[in-house]
Every structure is written in structure tokens, then in C-alpha cells.
């Protein structure tokens, strides 16, 4: 339904890096480093790397949840993290804005770099990090307040006080999620009264209101009807002109439809989550290099 080959997406945006980066993912294959151009016309690997993970291991207490995750996430692309339940997709996503810090007993080894600056370790300003890396959850978590207040809560927390400035942020953010026309006359109404699809778009608007650079979406369409899902997928494609988006999805068709890169995760023989294969989406789906990937994407897993 949503074509990725539209003009805007093909145009080299400001995020284009000077040189394509070599791919550090697991077992780079023949197509990995060469930067093959895909059917949708963009080669995600020509985009500057926004986020790097280097040999990242995650432990919840004694439980080893993620092993040696090394991947580069390219700016202004959509990356889909796929894999069976329990393989660590949400755990990985939460590392990118340090949401795992909230869990007692968590330990992280290895490095994660945002624009080449480490975001792991003590000196990180976590508030600033979460402003740069926003998150949208599986279920729309609107707050029990007005639509307007929901959207501007982040900027208010960051010190924006002027009504005019907040109004402008509310309008910009709601326009970005195509809710402005629908809701501009009911901004004072309770957000809880919106439909689930509208609520989820409101949550995306709330995330956008602080002008993040990366948006993490953990199964953000799984609780929605097909029409709302399509709207949000359309939004993702629109937003990726400016933002880097990382999604977790169990919906293979969604991964295919929207993402530029796909990361397939699985638990290994020691029950630890690993990155099995990471490649441009069309490549990964058309020509998976690992049997496990093929079994999973064709529905033969489990
Ligand atoms: N807060 C936590 N404390 C302890 N273990 C956890 C915690 N969160 C996740 N785990 C464990 O880490 C592993 C990976 O969980 P995670 O939620 O990241 O998987 P997932 O791939 O997102 O699964 P799903 O597809 O079901 O959402 C699981 O074995 C899970 O039980
Ligand atoms: Mg999960």
C-alpha cells in the first residue's frame, strides 16, 4: 500500500554520510559490504551510521539475555528487529535509550555509540539521551489529561513555558502524525476518549514533540486494527525522511513493507539472545543466509 520508492525517500537527505560504512554484522556475506542497491531504490548502507553497538552483552542479574550484539543502524532508515518471543528484541531496543537502567540488577557490557559518542557507562546524561531517543510502546500509553497536555508534556518538562511556543509544538507534532485536522477543535478534550489508533498516533506526536533523532517502536501496531496500522506505517515512512526509526515487530509483512534493514534475532543453544542475521530487508527476505532466518520468516519456526 505504501510505496517506499517515492521521490522524497530517494532524495539524498542531509543524513547521507560521506562514505558507505563497512558492515560489521555477523558473518558479512557477498552482498554485505558491496552496498547493493535494492528494489526500493535506496541503499540504507549509504546513510551515515547513527547508532552502533559493539559486542553488547546484557544481563538481568545472573540471566544472560543478549550476547555479543554488534550492529550499525543507519540514519534516516527504518530498521526492523524480528525474531521469536523471548529472544531479546525489547531488551535490545531498551538499551538504545537506557530504559533497561530502570530494571534492578541490570548489567551491560560492550559499547553503544550514538553519533559516535558512547551512551553506555556512567557519565551519560540519561534525560538528554531519552530526549534524543524517543520510545513508543505496544499499547498507547496516553496520560489522563487533555490531548494538548499529552503532546506538550515533554517540552514543558524541558522548560518550555510560553503558551505560543507550546501551541506551535502541539500543532507541528499533531500535523506530523496527521491528527491536526481531526483534533484541532478538541485539543482540550481528554485523550483517553480517542480511539486506540488515534491514541497511538498521539503517543507518536508526544514522542516527536521533543524533536528526537531516533524513535523506538516496540510492537507499536500490534494492538491496532489494520486501518490504524496502515496509517502508522504510512507515518513511519513519512517520518523516516527526518528520523531514524527502529521497530520491533512480529508481523513479517510489516517488516517487509516498511523497513530498510532487518535484524533477525534468536536464542542460541545456551538460551541467550543473539543477532543471527542483519541485512537490507529485501535481501534478508529474498535470500536469507541462515536456515534459522529462513525458517522464521517463512513461518516454519516453533
Ligand atoms: N526485567 C527483566 N528481568 C528479568 N528478565 C527479563 C526482564 N525483561 C526481559 N527478561 C528476559 O529476557 C529475555 C528477553 O526478553 P525480551 O522481553 O527482551 O524478549 P522479546 O524478544 O522482546 O520477547 P517478546 O517478543 O515476547 O516481546 C526473556 O527471557 C525475558 O524473560
Ligand atoms: Mg518484546
Image (spheres, rainbow, N blue to C red):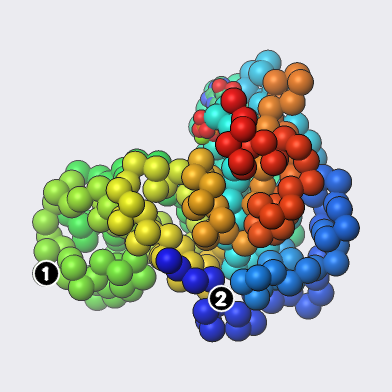
Give above or below for 250 relative to 35.
above
Give above or below for 70 relative to 292.
below
Within 10 Å of disc 2 (Cα), the crowding (few <14, some 14-19, many 20+) is few
Give above or below for 241 relative to 79.
below
184 sits to left or right of 7:
left
Beta carbon of the mark 1 residue lies under 8 A of ligand 2:
no
Q: Residue at image x 81%, y 74%?
A: 19
Q: Which residue is mark 1?
A: 185
Identify the mark at residue 160; answer none if there is no mark.
none
Residue 120 in percent (x, y) is at: 68, 43
Residue 227 appears in which quarter of the rendering?
A: bottom left
Residue 122 in percent (x, y) is at: 67, 40
Q: Which residue is mark 2?
A: 5
Residue 22 appears in which quarter of the rendering?
A: bottom right
State whether residue 28 appears in this view. Answer: yes
Q: Residue at image x 26%, y 66%?
A: 179
Q: Nearer the viewer, residue 227 or 145?
A: 227
Q: Nearer the viewer, residue 254 or 298?
A: 298
Q: Secondary structure at mark 2?
A: loop
State whether residue 129 appears in this view. Answer: no
Q: In which quadrant is the C terminus drawn? A: top right
Amino acid at each position: 500500500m505504501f510505496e517506499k520508492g517515492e521521490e522524497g525517500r530517494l532524495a539524498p537527505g542531509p543524513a547521507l554520510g560521506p562514505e558507505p560504512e563497512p558492515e560489521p554484522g555477523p558473518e558479512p556475506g557477498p552482498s554485505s559490504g558491496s552496498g547493493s542497491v535494492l528494489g526500493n531504490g535506496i541503499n540504507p548502507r549509504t546513510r551515515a551510521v547513527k547508532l552502533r553497538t559493539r559486542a553488547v552483552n546484557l544481563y538481568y542479574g545472573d540471566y544472560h539475555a543478549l550476547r555479543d550484539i554488534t550492529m550499525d543502524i543507519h540514519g534516516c532508515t527504518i530498521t526492523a528487529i524480528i525474531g521469536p518471543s523471548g529472544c531479546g528484541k525489547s531488551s535490545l531496543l531498551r538499551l538504545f535509550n537506557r530504559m533497561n537502567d530502570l530494571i534492578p540488577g541490570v548489567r551491560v557490557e560492550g559499547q553503544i555509540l550514538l553519533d559516535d559518542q558512547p551512551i553506555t557507562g556512567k557519565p551519560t546524561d540519561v534525560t538528554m539521551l531519552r530526549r534524543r531517543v524517543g520510545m513508543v510502546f505496544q499499547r498507547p500509553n496516553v496520560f489522563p489529561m487533555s490531548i494538548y497536555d499529552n503532546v506538550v508534556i515533554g517540552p514543558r518538562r524541558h522548560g518550555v513555558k510560553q503558551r505560543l511556543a507550546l501551541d506551535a509544538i502541539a500543532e507541528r507534532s499533531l500535523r506530523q502524525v496527521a491528527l491536526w485536522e481531526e483534533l484541532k477543535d478538541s485539543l482540550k478534550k481528554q485523550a483517553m476518549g480517542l480511539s486506540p489508533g488515534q491514541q497511538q498516533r498521539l503517543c507518536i506526536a508526544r514522542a516527536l514533540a521533543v524533536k528526537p533523532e531516533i524513535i523506538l517502536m516496540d510492537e507499536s501496531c500490534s494492538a491496532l486494527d489494520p486501518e490504524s496500522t496502515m496509517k502508522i506505517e504510512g507515518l513511519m515512512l513519512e517520518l523516516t525522511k527526518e528520523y531514524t526509526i527502529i521497530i520491533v515487530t512480529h508481523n513479517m509483512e510489516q517488516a517487509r513493507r516498511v523497513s530498510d534493514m532487518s535484524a533477525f534475532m534468536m536464542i542460541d543453544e545456551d538460551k541467550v539472545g543473539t543477532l543471527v542475521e542483519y541485512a537490507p530487508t529485501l535481501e534478508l527476505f529474498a535470500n536469507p543466509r541462515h536456515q534459522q532466518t529462513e525458517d522464521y520468516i517463512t513461518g516454519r519456526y516453533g
